[in-house]
Image: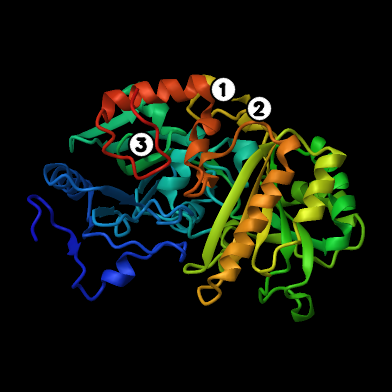
């Protein structure tokens, strides 16, 4: 098989690398594309899109391959694979970085931290830059520096016609608006240009763990603690079991626990003061908060969500952390069968909330918290485990119904959440996205995603 103008690698079912090339982060996804076009650059991406359109092939686009729904791979179509396009060019003088569409956040942090710079990225180092960015981009730096999309300066986009465009505030501004939260609906983003900020390289960061029985007390304290927290302090709650990491005493491994992971985007001494009250609360099982390299902290939980495990997600935005909401969370968080299942809650606000709602396609600017319920089981634990863990996640979400804000972060939607895509945007933003979709992709060529149909 040959693609005109394509210089990358073509992988078909008879290729030795086929089974490896078609796997994605979520091992529960098992799809068999007709062709995987592993691109070497933007010209290859354009050639692959034109080939797919000419041969009427279903298109999936792979950046980091990290989306839980497995949208990066399709059956009997073509995967436009950017995984070989992982270069990052940092410009310390201009405080910007250009990042190829197949890069992972660990790649970005590695290059930018060489200059003491960073931008808001995911909380797991092997998350793909493209997918996280296009959905909005939440992470530890967002309260200080905004979402990832709030730091996006420009994007190089291959359209459904195979045309290469540059989208920015000055060029194709409607497309640039849609890319900032509208997902992969509008084209293949071959590269991004981000604003960078002074961060680290040493930051005050790490998790504290308390026993699961302390969950209600910890969450009530946390609610008051973050109400006065500075924007520099990013926190994520994790409820599940203590992961078996080398830095954690072995006798605590797999013990049910609540953790508060912190990262202070400022001077270490200021961070030490900002987390002092949290560290003194109750009787933590283990306190791993310490000065550490930002890049090390960002990759610290990579081994708790490994490639090839099976995942099923449910998520929602929350109206707040009322006593009733806390009670629901405490009642359901530890009811999973698998010790690997967990839930996580992100604290937004700060710089995220100060961006006008209509400035980007990310609509939930006024939400203070969202929660992800992550059912996890091993590949050899299929069957009953899959059903049991998935039911736990759905039941947890149902129990949260009185406390849901009516919105959801689009990047957290799973494959059976297609009916909730509009919920991620609200009617007004969704309609605007649908109009832009009709302009740049009227045939819905890019629909193997959290799809927005052209109006």
Residue at 60 percent of width and 30 percent of height: 364
Q: Quadrant of residue 104?
A: bottom left
Q: Dots 2 and 1: beta carbons under 8 Å?
A: yes
Viewer-closest of 218 and 123: 218
Q: Which mark is residue 366?
A: 2
Q: Which residue is mark 1?
A: 357
Q: Which secondary structure lies at badge 2?
A: loop
Q: How many marks?
A: 3
* Gap between marks 2 and 1 measured at Cα: 8 Å
Quadrant housing residue 434: top left
Reading the image, the residue beneath label 3 is: 185
| Disc number for residue 382 | none
Instruction: Tell me: 282 left or right of 318.
Output: right
> Which residue is painted at 31% across and 71% down in the image?
19
Measured as percent of width and height from the top left, residue 305 is found at: 56, 64
Answer yes or no: do the residues labelled 1 and 3 have beta carbons within 8 Å?
no
Which comes sooner in the sequence, label 2 or label 1? 1
Q: Is residue 123 in view from this perspective?
A: no
Which quarter of the rendering shows the N terminus? bottom left
Q: Is residue 34 above or below residue 145?
A: below
**Neighbour tally class for label 3: few under 14, some 14-19, many 20 plus, Cα within 10 Å:** many
Query: Which residue is farthest right?
Result: 282
Q: Residue at 78%, 39% (x, y): give it.
A: 229
């Amino acid at each position: 098989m040959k693609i005109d103008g394509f210089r990358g690698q073509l992988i078909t079912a008879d290729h030795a690398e086929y089974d490896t090339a078609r796997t994605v982060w979520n091992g529960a996804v098992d799809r068999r594309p007709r062709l995987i076009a592993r691109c070497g650059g933007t010209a290859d991406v354009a050639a692959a899109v034109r080939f797919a359109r000419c041969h009427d092939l279903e298109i999936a686009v792979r950046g980091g391959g990290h989306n839980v729904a497995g949208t990066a791979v399709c059956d009997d179509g073509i995967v436009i694979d950017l995984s070989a396009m992982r270069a990052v060019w940092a410009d310390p003088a201009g405080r910007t970085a250009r990042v190829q569409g197949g890069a992972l956040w660990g790649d970005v942090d590695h290059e930018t931290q060489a200059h003491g710079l960073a931008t808001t990225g995911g909380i797991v180092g092997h998350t793909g830059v493209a997918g996280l960015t296009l959905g909005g981009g939440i992470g530890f730096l967002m309260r200080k520096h905004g979402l990832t999309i709030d730091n996006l300066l420009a994007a190089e986009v291959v359209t459904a016609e195979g045309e290469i465009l540059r989208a920015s505030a000055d060029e194709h501004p409607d497309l640039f608006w849609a890319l900032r939260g509208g997902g992969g609906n509008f084209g293949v983003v071959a590269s991004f240009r981000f604003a960078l900020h002074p961060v680290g390289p040493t930051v005050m960061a790490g998790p504290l763990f308390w026993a699961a029985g302390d969950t209600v007390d910890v969450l009530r304290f946390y609610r008051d603690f973050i109400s006065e927290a500075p924007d520099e302090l990013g926190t994520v709650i994790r409820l599940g079991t203590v992961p078996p990491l080398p830095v954690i005493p072995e006798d605590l491994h797999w013990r049910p626990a609540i953790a508060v992971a912190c990262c202070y985007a400022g001077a270490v001494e200021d961070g030490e003061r900002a987390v002092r009250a949290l560290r003194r609360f109750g009787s933590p099982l283990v306190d791993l908060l310490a000065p550490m390299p930002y890049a090390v902290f960002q990759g610290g939980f990579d081994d708790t969500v490994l490639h090839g495990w099976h995942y099923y997600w449910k998520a929602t935005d929350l109206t707040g952390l009322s006593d009733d909401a806390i009670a629901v969370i405490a009642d359901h968080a530890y009811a999973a069968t698998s010790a690997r299942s967990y839930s996580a809650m992100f604290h937004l606000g700060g710089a995220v909330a100060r961006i006008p709602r209509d400035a980007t396609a990310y609509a939930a600017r006024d939400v203070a918290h969202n929660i992800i319920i992550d059912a996890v089981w091993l590949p050899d634990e299929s069957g009953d485990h899959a059903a049991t863990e998935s039911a736990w996640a759905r039941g947890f979400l149902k129990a949260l119904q009185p406390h849901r804000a009516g919105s959801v972060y689009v990047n957290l939607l799973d494959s059976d959440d297609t009916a909730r895509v509009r919920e991620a945007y609200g009617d007004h933003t969704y309609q605007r996205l649908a109009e832009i979709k009709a302009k740049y992709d009227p045939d819905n060529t890019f629909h193997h995603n959290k799809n927005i149909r052209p109006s």
